[in-house]
Image: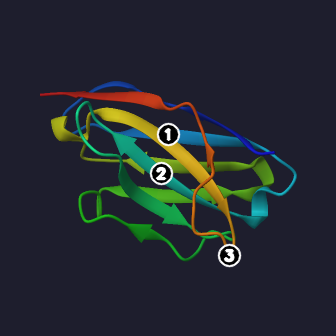
Amino acid sequence: QVQLAESGGGLVQAGGSLRLSCAASTRTFSTLRIGWFRQAPEKERELLATIGTSGGNTYYADSVKDRFIISRDNAKNTVYLQMNSLKPEDTAAYYCAARRVGITEYNYWGQGTQVTVSS
């Protein structure tokens, strides 16, 4: 079983930065691909970024490319999402999720952390 816990959300002014963390409680963290998602009220969940098991093979959605950076520290069982140049439209609940290599569905999810960007 994999448990994920996000932290680092909060209120920030437009143009500011936040770093989200996703801590995993599992002995097999290094075998998991991790993704960051967000969901704003009345909007569909959006995949933002993913990272491979060793820290390479990253993907970014166009909406966050060049502003957000995903990284991981397998020694700490943690994945990070550095968010820069934040915009009011980035306001949402942010979630990390994990899936095993070879599995297409993200079937482990955290509880989420709220990010609010004021204009």
Of marks 2 and 1, which one's residue comes earlier in the chain?
A: 1
Look at the numbered discs 2 and 1 and tell me whether their residues touch, using CB distance below 8 Å: yes
Q: Quadrant of the C terminus?
A: top left
Check disc 1 and give the amino acid type.
Leu
Decide: is 72 above or below 101: above
Residue at image coords 49%, 71%? 58
Q: Quadrant of residue 73?
A: bottom right
In this image, 97 relative to 68: left or right? Answer: right
Disc 2 marks which residue?
A: 36
Residue at image coords 59%, 37%? 110
Q: Which mark is residue 64?
A: none
Question: Furthest-right residue in view?
Answer: 27
In this image, 27 relative to 7: left or right? Answer: right
Look at the numbered discs 1 and 3 and tell me whether their residues touch, using CB distance below 8 Å: no
Nearer to us in this view, 93 or 72:
93
Disc 1 marks which residue?
A: 20
Where disc 3 sits, the SS reads loop
Of marks 2 and 3, which one's residue comes earlier in the chain?
A: 2
Q: Quadrant of residue 115?
A: top left
Q: Residues within 10 Å of mark 3 (few under 14, many from 20)?
A: few
Nearer to us in this view, 64 or 15:
64
Q: Which mark is residue 102?
A: 3
Mark 2 vs mark 1, foreground winner is: 2
Decide: is 36 above or below 49: above
Q: Residues within 10 Å of mark 2 (few under 14, many from 20)?
A: many
Q: CA distance from mark 2 to mark 1?
A: 10 Å
Check disc 3 and give the amino acid type.
Gly
In this image, 101 relative to 69: left or right? Answer: right
Position of residue 109 measured from the top left corner of the image (x, y, whole percent): 60, 42
Q: Residues within 10 Å of mark 1 (few under 14, many from 20)?
A: many
Check disc 2 and give the amino acid type.
Trp
